Image: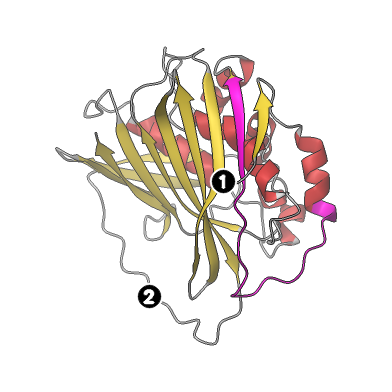
Amino acid sequence: MPETLLYTSTPPALLPLYGLVLTARRARPDRNTVLPDLQAELRGVSTGGEMLTAYRDLCDFDHGSHLPVTWPHVLAFPLHLRLLTEPAFPLPLLGLVHLRNSITQHRPLAVGENLDLRVRLGQREITKRGLEFDLITEAVSAGQCVWEESSTTLFRMPNDDASGAAPGAVKPLEHSETIHTPENIGRRYAKVSGDRNPIHLYALSARAFGFPRAIAHGMWSMARSLAVLQEQPEWRAGGFRVDCQFKKPLFLPGQARLQWQFQETGGDYQLLNADADAPHLSGRIEWL
């Protein structure tokens, strides 16, 4: 059983952790690299406050009595960064790629409800692209797991067989809406979430990582999409699971086309480029 890094009410401070991101020296990982058993817990975190209001405004969620489904991810971010800056964690953070995200909300979470957040490293897998690993997060209320997330991240490694399946043609979905992404959306998301990845902040900092301009944060794009979907008449109150695969970067400033289609068991959605012929993300919702 791994030792748990335990925090009460107040998460670990981010500034020292970002210092570790910039200064940590690690051995070069390879395909035999093993991830340690690491976990952290934040007990008694409040889910309300000014930052929640700012997050709702940023992603265009309604200001009702329930939390946005992606808000616990933001609350847990300091724990994520704490684990990934542990000396035992063997991968460099700069350059990691967020591939996909899956959230299961077992019931609506009330604004102001206190939660215990638990984070641990999950599955590790070697793929054609490199080393993939899961970061598992759980939100517990009154002893019951009410929300859980699996976030899959890639550390790229050279591969002689880098071939992959060619992307298929985009299949249009029934409904659509334009999503506008201003140049400063990455900085605004960083202010609310604490997630200050340089590829999302400025064109200059993004160029250092090979991007011509800053790109929208995947978790903002996912949240912004869900904010639209939850306003649709087909949306069902209660528990659901939402999966999201992150694909092509969304450069800032810009605009995208959100498309969706509901069925009896859930719905599909995709955020496409302005020409609606290439995906920035796609996913599915399943009612529980």
Q: Coloring scheme of the render?
A: secondary structure
Q: Position of residue 157 (x, y in %)?
A: 61, 74
40 in magenta: yes
Report helix, strand or loop for mark 2.
Answer: loop
Furthest toward the left, the residue is 264
Report, in whole angstroms, how far the alpha carbon at label 1 lies from the one at label 2: 42 Å
Q: Give the extent of the magenta segment.
A: 22-44
Amino acid bearing label 1: Met
Q: Amino acid at mark 2?
A: Ala
Query: Is the residue marked by circle 1 packed among few (<14), some (14-19), or many (20+) residues within 10 Å?
Result: few
Nearest the viewer among 76 and 199 is: 76
- Given the current orientation, which residue lies at the most extreme front position? 1
Q: Which mark is residue 104?
A: none
Q: Main secondary structure of the magenta part?
A: loop
Residue at the spot 67% in from the left edge and 50% down from the top edge: 84
Is residue 136 found left or right of 251 in the rendered image? left
Residue 107's x, y, as percent?
Answer: 33, 24
Please state if 285 lies on the left or on the right of 147 as rendered: left
